[in-house]
Amino acid sequence: MVTAFAPGKCILFGEHAVVYGQPAVAVSIDAGVEVTIRESNSWILEGMPFEPSRHPHISHIIDDIFDYTGRPLKIDIKSGLFSAAGLGSSAALSNSMGAALHHLVNPDEPLDLISLARIGHSAEANAQKGRASPTDTATSALGGCVVVSGERVKGTQHVFDATLETPEGSRSWSICRASLPQVDDTWIVLGFTGIGSPTGRMVAGVAELIERDPQKMDDIRAIGEITSSGLASLSKGDMESVGFAMNSCHEKLRNIGVSCPEIESLISAVENHSLGTKLTGAGGGGCMVSLTRHPRRVAECIEIAGGKPLVSKLGSEGARIL
């Protein structure tokens, strides 16, 4: 039996703008996905017969990545993440499954987190018909604070590059690590609206908006500038400035039409107890995030406003065997 865990992620800055070559900054969170696998007499997932076509992430890792030909496996999954909420739940599943199967097949080989990030990205791309950013899988695998951009970002540590052949052509990214100082008095609190975040539709909507109104690219470029400023503040541990950058980033995201009334309601409920608030992920539902020194109070406000809270420190440990 092998059990592996991979964390979810929260994008602090840069969502949507990263599609246009700007940097995105993400941190891993405490909650994530745990996968336990053990040999069995038949293929079982969550107590039911495993149907590969219904679980493309898992079947891709088993068949295409590892070319597994051993005994059937019983696979159990425990998730502490809200599904379809922009927290990287599918990436965490891919990474935890990849880590568990690697340890089962190669028990004496240590887990290579860069290789795991590539495995997870491959599984995401396969499930999303060739379209997948490495942001979620890299942040989940590596842990800490990860910066993804079209080019290397100054002030960060370059880790690896990723390329992907998409239906729109070849895409490439630089994945870097940013330092996170020890900050013991500040948390992030995620608030789930209860509405799934339709990533593909939101990205397409922004593209259509820019086509109709090219001046909206000014907001995209502004998000890139805010991201760079926010990252510098984060690296210095200046949490007040990080919060200010989050507020500014959300204003620009609101301008490009990716917020929604449910997100705005949760933000309004917690902003008096937060250093900064914004949506996180694609928008149109999903989650907002508060940077705060009062996590319990913020979590209570989210619940009162009809959301579901999730409290985390900034930048948890990455994927691992338990």
Image: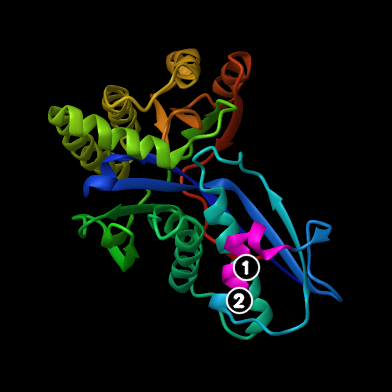
Mark 1: amino acid? Ser
* The quadrant where residue 133 appears: bottom left
Q: Which residue is mark 1?
A: 59
Q: Which residue is mark 2?
A: 63
Q: How many marks?
A: 2
Q: Is residue 140 in sight in this rendering?
A: yes
Mark 2: amino acid? Asp
Q: Residue at x 43, y 40 (%)?
A: 199
- Magenta-drawn stretch, dominant element (helix, strand or loop): helix
* The quadrant where residue 242 appears: top left
Q: Secondary structure at mark 2?
A: helix
For residue 55: magenta?
yes
Q: Is residue 22 in sight in this rendering?
A: no
Proximity of marks 1 and 2: CB atoms separated by less than 8 Å: yes
Question: In the rendering, at what x and y percent does residue 241 appear?
Answer: 28, 30
Q: How is the image coloured?
A: rainbow
